[in-house]
Amino acid sequence: MENKDSRFETKVIHAGYQAEEHLGSLVPPLYQTSTFTFANAEQGENRFAGQEEGYIYSRLGNPTVKILEDRMAALENGEAALAFSSGMAAVSAVLMALTKTGDHILCSQGVYGCTFGLLELLKEKYGIGHDFSLMESVETIENAILPNTACIYIETPINPTMKLVDLEMAAKIANDRGIPVVVDNTFCSPYLQTPLTLGCDIVVHSATKYICGHGDVIAGLVIGKKEFIQQVSRTTQKDIGGIISPFDAWLLVRGMKTLPVRMDRHAENARRIFEFLKHHPKIEDVYYPGDPENNDYAIMKKQMKTAGGLISFTIKGTKKTAQTFMNQLQLIKIAVSLGDAETLIQHPATMTHAVVPEEEREKMGIGNTLLRLSVGLEAWEDITEDLEQAFQKV
Ligand SMILES: *Cc1c(COP(=O)(O)O)cnc(C)c1O
């Protein structure tokens, strides 16, 4: 049987599930139900009062969802986890749980476009301010912390420029001041990076990406200390209601089993494609944490298992060149999202980061010739051949 000390590859298949509790079913059953019947009125009373364990209503908990949550908590080395209907439902539930009017959020310079949008919304509607910081040294972080800073929010690698933040360094500064650190671990998945073991407090995921891995679910996850997870569960999850459906949780439990196998292949393919792009005459710059000449290479070695499956690059020319190049691709699909079996390419300035004003985009390093490639699981030779034939047409 799986135990606490099992290795990642074992936990991702077994953690959080006991077949004998489910009539011996090898695969976790799908509890596709909105509500749970009580044996009698008193049992209902006791469950609502929290005096008896048991399910009540699927917005408050569901056995299939619980398997996903327990498995993710084990993989991130956290005490507990909660699943959500999307990555943004997870991010918003966490930020709303941690802040109140008058507070301040310190955020890494460059975040997912909708996280940027959420920070703007929190400022405009609820008076919760924010600042961005490159977080490249102890001083830059210390100088950016304000007396009312309620949390530090970090994406690493940063989307889509692939810059890294040293999580151990950031966590140490924040821990000394009692400020919680939230990390969006979507680009890595717990297989490549476990922020909680580096001193960070809360991990959020868009499970839509590598955790699902098959491009057929939108979902989010939050992992952290039991007390914080219970607080979110009883407030910003229960009352705002962005819960995952049991079927989507079931699909995630199914897709996750192959996470380590997939991530190894994504990373190996990405390394091959980086080699191909690095000296390509049509390319200006390549952004890939596995590049030994990259400023953040030492941080990658320290906190990530491999450099992962994402590469960004700038093509020589203009926005038009970038778009023409994309239109010539045949195997590689033009789509946002990442972490799927299919290789996907997108143009951040007009797609994922279109909501970010141009001035902010420039500061984040997102120009009009920047493209982001989510390297899939196809034969790497076929991916590079497709890239090459498209380069020849621009
Ligand atoms: C996709 C993504 C999100 C948002 O997740 P959804 O599941 O689309 O709501 C947040 N952060 C990062 C880094 C992402 O890539």
Image (cartoon, rainbow, N blue to C red):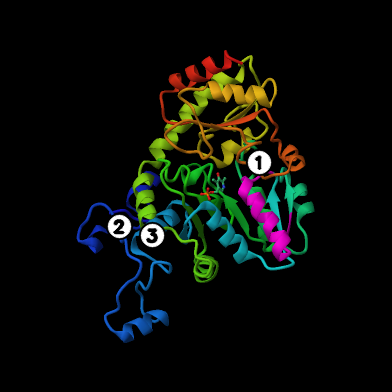
The answer as to whether callout 2 falls within 8 Å of ligand 1 is no
Q: Please state which of residues 42 and 164 is positioned toward the viewer in this rendering.
A: 42
Task: Indicate which label's residue lies in the foreground, 1 or 3.
Answer: 1
Q: Secondary structure at mark 3?
A: helix
Q: Is residue 151 above or below residue 271?
A: below
Residue 30 tag number: 2
Gap between marks 1 and 3 measured at Cα: 33 Å
Q: Report the amino acid beneath label 3.
A: Val
Say which amino acid is labelled 2: Leu
Q: Nearer the viewer, residue 383 or 227?
A: 383
Determine which residue is flagged by label 1: 354
Q: Position of residue 365 (x, y in %)?
A: 71, 36
For image coordinates 59% across by 37% down, the residue present is: 300
| Residue that mark 3 sits on | 65
Residue 372 on the magenta span: no
In the image, the segment drawn in magenta is 110-130
> Tag 3: Cα neighbours inside 10 Å, few (<14), some, or many (≥20)?
many
Residue 214: give x, y in percent of width and height. 40, 40
Give the CA distance from mark 2 to mark 1: 38 Å
The crowd level at tag 1 (other Cα within 10 Å; few <14, some 14-19, many 20+) is some
Residue 233 in view, yes or no: yes
Q: 43 above or below 132?
A: below
Q: Residue at x 52, y 42 (%)?
A: 188
Q: Is mark 1 within 8 Å of ligand 1?
A: no
